[in-house]
Image (cartoon, rainbow, N blue to C red):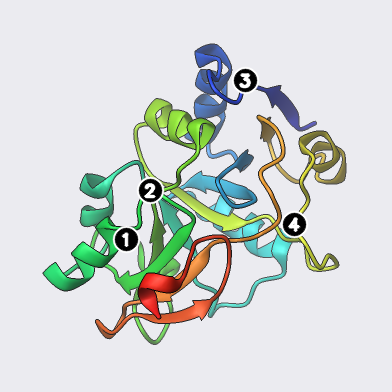
Amino acid sequence: MTQYFEVHPENPQRRALGQVAEILRSEGLVVYPTDSCFALGCRVGNKDGLERIRSIRHLDRNHHFTLVCRNFAELGQLVNVNNTVFRAIKASTPGSYTFILPATKEVPRRLLHPKKRTVGVRIPDHVTAQALLDTLDEPLLSSTLLLPEQDEPMTNGWDIKQRLDHAVDAVVDSGDCGTQPTTVIDFSDDEGEIVRYGAGDPTMFE
């Protein structure tokens, strides 16, 4: 049965997040809130978690997964960023943006786009997401929780728990976090190209 953790949106309880982190360290798959929708998340090296995300969302092998980071120190270990791209990303994070960039050797090949060798990265502007990342002390492999039969992501944590009972190991709920996914900018060729308009203001990338 899926465990359900209701945490305070401004001061998430450390004990609850510690339990969620232990579930993740035990190769679990969790649903957690971000600044743009609930997301599915597991450890970067969790092969089974990756396949479970693919199964829940019906994703093909060309899907860009996202590595959710606390800060630029983590992000810089996972993707190659030149000075121009760094300034553009720095000006818009933390926030509701995902950036597609060439991956470093730190990223398992199974997470990369098969042709481009790229991966998505982001730094969320969300108290609970950041607190969970701090507790876990490593990035999360993530994907927006958008089920294949739905037009919009689910917004109610308890409804998610009931809908995905047994499919995920935990749901972390700190309130509604909206239905708009991130704005996605592809920097794989250094020139920023908006490939999805979402919650983040795209103006600076147009």
| Sequence order check, earlier mark of 3 and 4 | 3
Secondary structure, mark 3, is: loop
User: Which amino acid, mark 3?
Assistant: His
Residue under the point 76% across and 36% down? 157
Secondary structure, mark 4, is: loop
Secondary structure, mark 2, is: loop
Q: Is residue 205 above or below residue 183?
A: below
Q: Which mark is residue 153?
A: 4
Whether tag 3 and tag 2 are in contact, CB under 8 A, the answer is no
Instruction: Please identify the quarter of the rendering in which residue 1 is found.
Output: top right
Secondary structure, mark 1, is: loop
| Sequence order check, earlier mark of 2 and 1 | 2
Q: Which residue is mark 2?
A: 94
| Sequence order check, earlier mark of 1 and 3 | 3
Q: Is residue 186 above or below residue 130?
A: below
Q: Which mark is residue 8?
A: 3
Residue farthest to the left? 83
Q: Separation of disc 1 and disc 3 at Cα?
A: 32 Å
